[in-house]
Amino acid sequence: MTYGHRKHPRETLTTTRPQDRIHLAPAPSGRAPSYTRRAFLTTAGLAAAGLATYSNTLARHELVHSKITLPIRNLPDAFVGFRMVQISDLHLHGFTESWFLEQVIGQVNAMDPEVVLITGDFVSRGGSQRKITQAAGECAEILSQLKAPQRFGILGNHDVAVGANRVIEPLEAHRTPVLVDSFFALERGSDLLWLAGADDASIRLPDLDMSIPLYPKAPVILLAHEPDFVDHVVKHPRFPLIDAMLSGHTHGGQIRLPGVGPLVLPPLGKHYVQGAFQFEHMKLYVNRGVGTVGVPFRFNCPAEITEITLQRA
Ligand SMILES: [Fe+2]
């Protein structure tokens, strides 16, 4: 697996040259001159404002392409080398602007995948009903610019919180099927690959007996918004049938301080925050998402588009 992680420009973090440092040693009179304190506060204020601007305008719109391979047991010939793209947590018109989502769609189109998987949180909770309905409609419309032959979505906790049908209806009207405790068979000739979509696990109770086919006789990829739901998945009787699980929800922590890690993580997104995790035969991959919630900031945690290639295990 290669896991792209662009380095932030160092100069945005360390801007103070030795000759610019402010010394707070007392003046010869024994009393620190008031301008020194003022200068310190001004510099600190400017640095905080600069960091906030960087986190909001630059870091929040930094997009990283991650490339992973998923080794799948008994992968049928037609799906060896099969390429899918995962995007997640779009949160349109929470803080995500239409132009940024359109930029994401443009980059996904340039990757030319066979299928696009969107793992929940199309919109954000909060705001008026009118604004949310408008955001859901616009999101569905922008997603219809995807050129991949097929695309599928699942629900996230924000989608359920604003009313699942408010999100599902425009998506399905714009040819993005939403898998809610249901499955779909991708067919290539006589070969099959199952996409299984779990309902949101934060607000509702997914039913894996409904989302995982009982006798799939082909690989199964489970889409489930909340990654910590995996702890339930591995105990479920149908776990042996699941070959991979794709999640989002955490935004990778959104703000990751060096040496500290993510500042805030959501319920059911605390253990498997970003990247790949192995559970016996099954790999879980957690995508950092496109949008943000709570604050319009990312730091040390860029938005992500994941290109997934299937290989025979
Ligand atoms: Fe979420």
Image (spheres, rainbow, N blue to C red):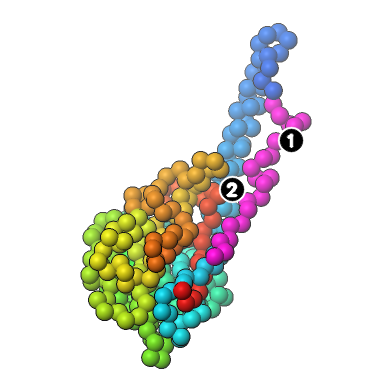
Q: Residue furthest bottom?
A: 189
**Residue 5 inside the magenta-drawn segment:** yes
Q: Is residue 48 left or right of residue 174?
A: right
User: As displayed, is residue 39 above or below residue 249?
Assistant: above
User: As displayed, is residue 69 above or below residue 130?
Assistant: below
- Residue 69 is situated, as x and y percent measured from the top left of the image, at 51, 70
- Residue 236 is situated, as x and y percent measured from the top left of the image, at 26, 63
- Residue 26 is situated, as x and y percent measured from the top left of the image, at 68, 14
- Viewer-nearest residue: 193 or 168: 193
> Label 1 belongs to which residue?
17
- Which label sits in the foreground, 2 or 1? 1
> Label 2 belongs to which residue?
54
Q: Say which residue appears at 68% left-offset and 45% top-offset.
A: 11
Q: Residue furthest top?
A: 29
Q: Earlier in the sequence, mark 2 or mark 1?
A: 1
- Viewer-nearest residue: 285 or 46: 285
Q: Label 1 amino acid?
A: Arg
- Residue 18 is situated, as x and y percent measured from the top left of the image, at 75, 32
Under tag 1, what secondary structure? loop
For label 2, the crowd category at 10 Å Cα-Cα, with few meaning under 14, some 14 to 19 and many 20 or more, is some
- Viewer-nearest residue: 84 or 25: 84
Q: Say which residue appears at 71% left-offset and 29% top-offset.
A: 21
Confirm whether residue 127 shows in the render. no
Q: Say which residue appears at 36% left-offset and 61% top-offset.
A: 225
